[in-house]
Image (cartoon, grey):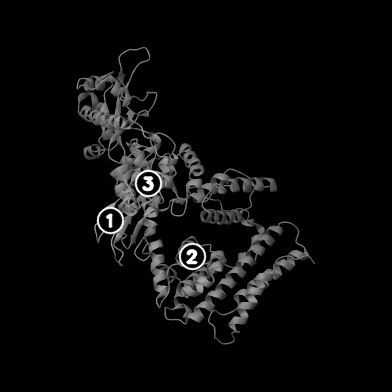
Amino acid sequence: MSLPDGFIEELRTRLSIAQVAGRKVTWDTRKSNIGKGDYWAPCPFHQEKSASFHVDDRKGFYYCFGCHAKGDALTFVRETENVGFMEAVEILAREAGMPVPKQDPVAQKKADRRTILADIMEQALQFYRMQLKTNLATTAREYLEKRGMPLDIQDRFEIGYAADTRAALFQHLTGKGISAADLDEAGLCVKPDDGGSPFDRFRGRIIFPIRDARGRCIAFGGRAMDPNARAKYLNSPETPLFDKGRSLYNHGPAREAAGKTQSLIVAEGYMDVIALAQAGFNHAVAPLGTAITENQLHLMWRIAPEPIIALDGDTAGIRAARRLIDLALPLMEAGKSLRFVVLPEGQDPDDLLKSSGPQAMQDLLDAAQPMVTLLWEREVEGKVFDSPERRAALDTSLRAALSTIKDPSLRTHYTAAIKELRAELFAPKNRRDAPWQPGKGAWGKKTPQAATSGTKLSILGQTAVSDTFRLREALILAAAIRNPKAALVRETALEKSPIAAPDLIKIQSALLASLHLDLSGEDASGRLISAMTDRLGFNPMDHLLTLAPVRIHPHLKPDADPDLIALTLSEELVKHAANKGAEAELREAERDMEGLADEGLTWRIQQASEARAEATKASVNPGGEGSEDRENLSQQLQKLIDDQIWVKKKR
């Protein structure tokens, strides 16, 4: 049976070979780097104990360095299941949710037609390339020179030119024996409704060839030289070769470059991609004249797990980014997300690179904003939340957006992040009559600093609590890493521990994801650190030890007594919960302070202050002079948290 052209490619796009092979092998977590799509395991094709079987999930291939078995997901199923090609296709199609096309007697004929059309497209490209060197292309060459596009870049991207004549390409290709019907089917010519002679689709335009992931020329894009042209950019129409919603400009070269940089830039158009490549950013692609589609998102995620969407700094660019949020939220999962960069107002990548150089672009990419930031700013920008009804409306719209996230773990983390942003917005220091303006986020605007008169009276305003919280969070994580067994016992508490610092949230996530690995034996902490390092790309303990109190803590040394490490972990978890609970009540009390203070409010603040003092007064060095019995203190603190004595009770 012949399958439709593109079906196998679509099947490979939808499936993860790591997921397919993972049913038959056990991944070596110490050697694998899952975040980079790099998997290792003992080979299923020959008897061995070492992890010589390698899967590159991004490229979709496997290779065994022992027996030299190699192939893709289809090959793997055929070899491990002992089935034929079509049976393997059916197995994988069911897994991908794709119906296998029924046998079509003309399928092979259609595939042959696509081969013919691809050959015609290559001949057209060669014609356009030659046209760029003629006198008819003087204006086009001057334009490319003005844009700073040297000959080597023109050759690399195969830039051509379609002369402003009615049928130059048509006459050239029909003169070589190609029929008018074939040229029409390939999208190169247009047949008038009145039955007149066909004419060239592209006229008076610089030509950009569009190639698919396999390297075939499937379409063209053309930029008009006439400033009065009806369309500045024109793409080939949909053809048997070209589906613009499933294609990316510069797909193949960007995929190869992304394998080295572990990153992917998504720009708006051809010229952006070429300018980025000229500046050394070879890992850039662009959609083809439309908003990014679901299929294009999946193509991007196959190249890199967290593509950076780089959009022009104008209203249209910001609008496009915000629309993309609704498309991406239901499709995201752990390890597949988006980050966003919006360039300075009025600039595209070419403008920025020419005015400020590649480093300025790299700085923007390094500061790319996570999608949760854009979601939040989309919902609050330009709005006033001066009534319960308006706040409730904000909550409703946020809940609606978050409910579209299908991955439960991801939805939980998004909800937590939005909760923190909401608390910050409605905190007394941020209460304002003016419309909300986002901070130094994706849109690059500044947030005006505001403070209420009540801040000076605030207990929180008297101390730099954020530094204290960060230190305690670091102590918790360091203790958990030093004693994985104790961390596993307290896994629920670790998961619920309100870590706030973004860098420490990453370490917390890597810790929880690695705790269930095989950590038995003497060097459990070392193996845990190794597994977390693979996930994070850096050593978590080295990062935590940059804080002096963590570095010098006697119970966080590599050779510390495990029981004392466990006790330290328990204490710090309880103290952190106590501090966070007290802070939350104090924030609520501060909001109430804007009205008339009463006896109940004064009582709440007093109780919160006592709770915080009780939670933090104990020395972190047990056994010191005057210290209490550690177990009793932990129990007292836990009771304090459980009772929540700072919360106003009915009296």
To which residue does mark 2 refer? 512
Residue named by callout 3: 265
Write down the quadrant of residue 23 in the picture. Answer: bottom left
Quote the CA–CA distance across marks 3 and 2. 30 Å
Q: Mark 2 or mark 1: which comes first in sequence?
A: 1
Amino acid type, callout 2:
Leu
Which quadrant holds residue 240? top left
Residue at the right extreme, as displayed: 651
Label drawn at residue 648: none
Q: Residues within 10 Å of mark 2 (few under 14, many from 20)?
A: some
**Which circle, 2 or 1, is nearer the viewer?**
1
The furthest residue to the bottom: 625
Say what secondary structure mark 1 lies in.
strand
161 left or right of 94 in image:
left
Secondary structure of the residue carrying numbered label 2: helix
Asked if marks 2 and 1 touch (Cβ < 8 Å), the reply is no
Mark 2–mark 1 Cα distance, whole angstroms, equals: 31 Å
